[in-house]
């Protein structure tokens, strides 16, 4: 005998007010450990202990169309959970243990520690997760609508093109899936998330940032995997231009508050300014300086939303020596002042 739970992706991640969670509370099979609300979403952490499952889960609803679930679950008997929907991306990273995954109960696959799987639901489909009795797993799962993905990717035509490339395979095989090995940095982040950490003002922002990093990594891998490339490292070897662009982006991601010039970046990578600029624009559809400006302002916006310092302190943190220049750049980009 096994327990089977069916949910819709779009309504699967409500707060403790959710009817199914309330029913489990009344049955004494679930205990809400903590709950915190933040602008646009909430975190709910609970302990489940029914006839089939024992463990803890944390649900972070970034917004209505973007949720992150971290689980540390032991199955006392066979258990299956199904999520159905259309217009969604579903990404899961197995941190420890193993479990079985399938779409519409076809072509089941065992995910083991270090495995990532991205599923695309442009058409309606059902993701099934099956766990054998006596087994245990820890994982991080992301559910993001296609519209939310484009919004958070925030690069306009680039996001549209990426989605079109991802769906090329799906047009032939509905509900395309890609599986790959997580990088060391993703595994470190996944372990941090799955340990649940203490609640704090920056935890929602941290989870959101890491979730977007996971999703972009997975989408890029799936996009190039469909072209016969075995991984992102193989992809970099295909083209010196791609390698230059990726190295430049990595430097800017780490040091966005630094005032690097194009010549300085080119010197660090071992190329010239023209090649660097052309390579970066070809890969990311914007110049390195445009990317750095956008990254600075996005970091600043998150800091302001979670009240991390004054406008002047935030401006200095993201690399603006003059607060007035920061305010002007922020207003031009977002259409409102940092203070508002």
Image: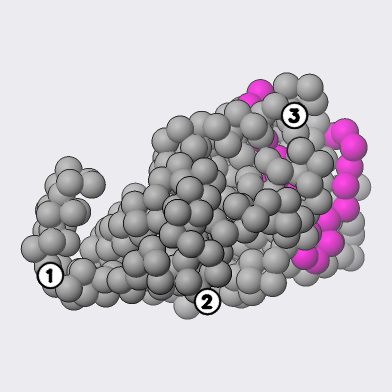
Query: Earlier along the polypeptide chain: callout 2 or callout 3?
Result: 3
Residue 311 at x, y = what percent?
A: 15, 68
Does the CB distance between marks 1 and 2 fall below 8 Å? Answer: no
User: Is 132 left or right of 302, judged from the image as shown?
Assistant: right
Foreground: 58 or 268? Answer: 268
Query: Earlier along the polypeptide chain: callout 3 or callout 1?
Result: 3
- Name the residue that disc number 1 marks: 322
Q: CA distance from mark 3 to mark 1?
A: 48 Å
Please, what secondary structure does the residue beneath circle 3 have? Answer: helix
Foreground: 290 or 30? Answer: 290
Task: Tell me which residue sits at (34%, 56%) in the image.
Answer: 289
Q: Quadrant of residue 203?
A: bottom left
Q: Residues within 10 Å of mark 2 (few under 14, many from 20)?
A: few
User: Is 53 left or right of 307, judged from the image as shown?
Assistant: right
Task: Tell me which residue sits at (73%, 22%) in the image.
Answer: 171
Query: Earlier along the polypeptide chain: callout 1 or callout 2?
Result: 2
Q: Quadrant of residue 265?
A: bottom left
Does the CB distance between marks 3 and 1 fall below 8 Å? Answer: no
Mark identifier at residue 197 = 2
- Name the residue that disc number 3 marks: 169
Look at the image and give the residue range highlighted in magenta: 105-124
Q: Does the image show residue 144?
A: yes
Residue 7 lies in the magenta-colored region: no
Q: CA distance from mark 1 to mark 2?
A: 36 Å
């Amino acid at each position: 005998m096994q327990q089977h739970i069916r949910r819709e992706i779009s309504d699967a991640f409500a707060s403790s007010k959710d009817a199914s969670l309330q029913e489990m509370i009344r049955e004494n099979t679930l205990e809400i450990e903590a709950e915190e609300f933040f602008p646009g979403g909430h975190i709910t952490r609970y302990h489940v202990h029914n006839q089939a499952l024992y463990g803890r889960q944390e649900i972070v609803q970034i917004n209505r169309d973007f949720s992150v679930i971290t689980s540390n679950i032991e199955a006392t008997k066979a258990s299956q959970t199904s999520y159905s929907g259309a217009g969604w991306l579903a990404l899961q990273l197995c941190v420890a243990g193993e479990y079985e995954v399938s779409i519409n109960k076809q072509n089941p696959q065992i995910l083991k520690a270090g495995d990532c799987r991205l599923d695309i639901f442009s058409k309606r489909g059902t993701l099934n997760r099956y766990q054998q009795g006596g087994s245990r797993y820890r994982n991080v799962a992301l559910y993001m609508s296609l519209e939310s993905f484009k919004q958070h990717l925030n690069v306009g035509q680039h996001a549209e093109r990426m989605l079109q490339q991802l769906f090329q395979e799906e047009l032939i095989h509905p509900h395309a899936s890609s599986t790959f090995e997580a990088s060391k940095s993703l595994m470190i982040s996944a372990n941090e998330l799955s340990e649940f950490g203490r609640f704090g003002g920056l935890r929602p922002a941290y989870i959101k940032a890491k979730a977007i990093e996971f999703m972009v990594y997975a989408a890029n891998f799936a996009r190039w995997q469909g072209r016969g490339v075995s991984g992102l490292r193989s992809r970099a070897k295909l083209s010196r231009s791609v390698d230059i662009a990726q190295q430049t982006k990595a430097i800017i991601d780490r040091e966005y508050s630094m005032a690097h010039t194009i010549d300085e970046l080119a010197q660090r990578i071992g190329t010239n300014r023209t090649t660097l600029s052309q390579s970066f624009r070809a890969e990311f559809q914007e110049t390195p300086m445009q990317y750095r400006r956008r990254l600075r302002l996005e970091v600043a916006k998150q800091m302001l939303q979670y009240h991390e310092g004054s406008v002047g302190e935030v401006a200095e943190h993201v690399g603006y020596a003059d607060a007035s220049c920061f305010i002007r750049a922020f207003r031009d980009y977002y259409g409102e002042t940092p203070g508002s």
